[in-house]
Amino acid sequence: MGLLKRPVTQDELLIYEGRSKDPAEGQDTKIAGTGDDGDPLSAARGTVLAVVLGGIIWAVVLWVLL
């Protein structure tokens, strides 16, 4: 980083910030295959499934160690 010849104003920084957040023209911003349908019930099912499977895996690991 070099020294600035003049201080940058807040307005100049906001102009660059707005440009950096916009997607490029023609660029697809969606991610294919995420599987997120936005249903809270699906999220709850996924959480319960993860907790149950995690518990089973830890039970097997502890059983093998003992």
Image (spheres, rainbow, N blue to C red):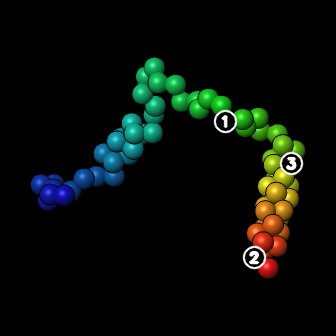
Marks 2/1 in contact by CB < 8 Å: the verdict is no
Q: Tag 2, which secondary structure?
A: helix
Amino acid type, mark 1: Thr
Quick check: 9 left or right of 20? left
Q: Does residue 18 show up?
A: yes
27 w.r.t. 7: above or below: above
Percent of width and height locating residue 64 = 78, 72
Which residue lies at the image location 77% right of the left edge and 38% below the top edge?
38
Quick check: 7 left or right of 48? left
Which residue lies at the image location 86% right of the left edge and 48% below the top edge?
45
Amino acid type, mark 2: Leu
Q: Quadrant of the C terminus?
A: bottom right
Of the numbered discs 2 and 1, the one sitting upstream in the chain is 1
Which label was assigned to residue 65?
A: 2
Residue tagged by mark 1?
A: 34
Q: Tag 1, which secondary structure?
A: loop
Which residue lies at the image location 12% right of the left edge and 54% below the top edge?
5
Asked where in the image residue 57 lies, by quadrant, the reply is bottom right
Marks 3/2 in contact by CB < 8 Å: the verdict is no
Residue tagged by mark 3?
A: 45
Percent of width and height locating residue 50 = 79, 55
Percent of width and height locating residue 28 = 52, 25
Gap in Å between the C-alphas at discs 3 and 2?
30 Å
Looking at this view, name the residue that lies furthest to the left.
5
Of the numbered discs 1 and 3, the one sitting upstream in the chain is 1
Disc 3 packing (10 Å; few <14; some 14–19; many ≥20)? few
Q: Nearer the viewer, residue 9 or 34?
A: 34
Quick check: 61 left or right of 45? left
